[in-house]
């Protein structure tokens, strides 16, 4: 090999080594930069940990409140249902007494198709006729 070829070969090898060294250094710097960015992101995430903890605490608190509200609503609904049942029983008992009174009252014809129990307050679809008004000619039928 000639001196020129040797010099060219050495220069090419040195250039390749310098290029490889530059590539390794650039890669190392990029890794350090990414590691630094990752560290910064972790620091930011750590500051958000308190926010996450507070949000979790708030979510548990509101969930517990919702469960209490549901339980209260269920109790209120059960109480309302008992009240409705009590009302229905009271109304049925009242109507039974009114029908029994109508059955006993000779002025009330309980056999009429349009019979309705008299209202204890005085209003009724089957209220007794006013004084002097025409009344049934035949005696009342007891049912």
Image: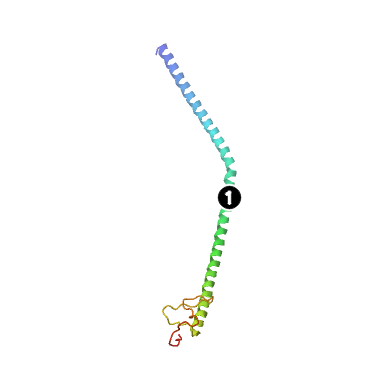
Q: Residue at x 51, y 73 (%)?
A: 88
Q: Nearer the viewer, residue 121 or 60?
A: 121
Q: Residue at x 53, y 30 (%)?
A: 33
Query: Position of 47 compared to 25: left or right?
Result: right
Outermost residue toward the top in this view: 3
Q: How is the image coloured?
A: rainbow
In the image, residue 83 above or below residue 105: above
Q: Residue at x 58, y 44 (%)?
A: 51
Disc 1 crowd rating (10 Å Cα; few below 14, some 14-19, many 20+) is: few
In the image, residue 4 above or below residue 21: above
Q: How many marks?
A: 1
Q: Nearer the viewer, residue 22 or 118?
A: 118
The N terminus - image quarter: top left
Which residue is labeled 1 in the image?
A: 58
Residue 50: percent from left, percent from top: 60, 44
In the image, residue 48 above or below residue 128: above
The C terminus - image quarter: bottom left
The quarter of the picture where residue 9 lies is top left
The quarter of the picture where residue 38 lies is top right
Residue 49: percent from left, percent from top: 58, 43
Q: Residue at x 54, y 60 (%)?
A: 70
Q: Nearer the viewer, residue 137 or 26?
A: 137
Q: Secondary structure at mark 1?
A: helix
Outermost residue toward the front in this view: 132
Outermost residue toward the bottom in this view: 139
């Amino acid at each position: 090999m000639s001196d020129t070829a040797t010099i060219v070969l050495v220069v090419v090898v040195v250039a390749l080594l310098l290029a490889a060294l530059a590539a390794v250094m650039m890669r190392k710097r990029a890794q350090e930069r990414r590691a630094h960015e990752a560290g910064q992101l972790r620091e930011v995430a750590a500051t958000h940990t308190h926010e996450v903890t507070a949000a979790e605490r708030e979510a548990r608190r509101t969930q517990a409140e919702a469960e209490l509200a549901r339980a209260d609503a269920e109790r209120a609904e059960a109480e309302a249902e008992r009240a409705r049942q009590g009302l229905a029983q009271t109304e049925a008992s009242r109507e039974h007494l009114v029908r029994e009174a109508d059955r006993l009252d000779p002025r009330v014809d309980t056999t009429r198709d349009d019979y309705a129990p008299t209202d204890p307050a005085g209003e009724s679809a089957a209220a007794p006729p006013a004084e002097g008004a025409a009344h049934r000619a035949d005696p009342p039928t007891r049912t």
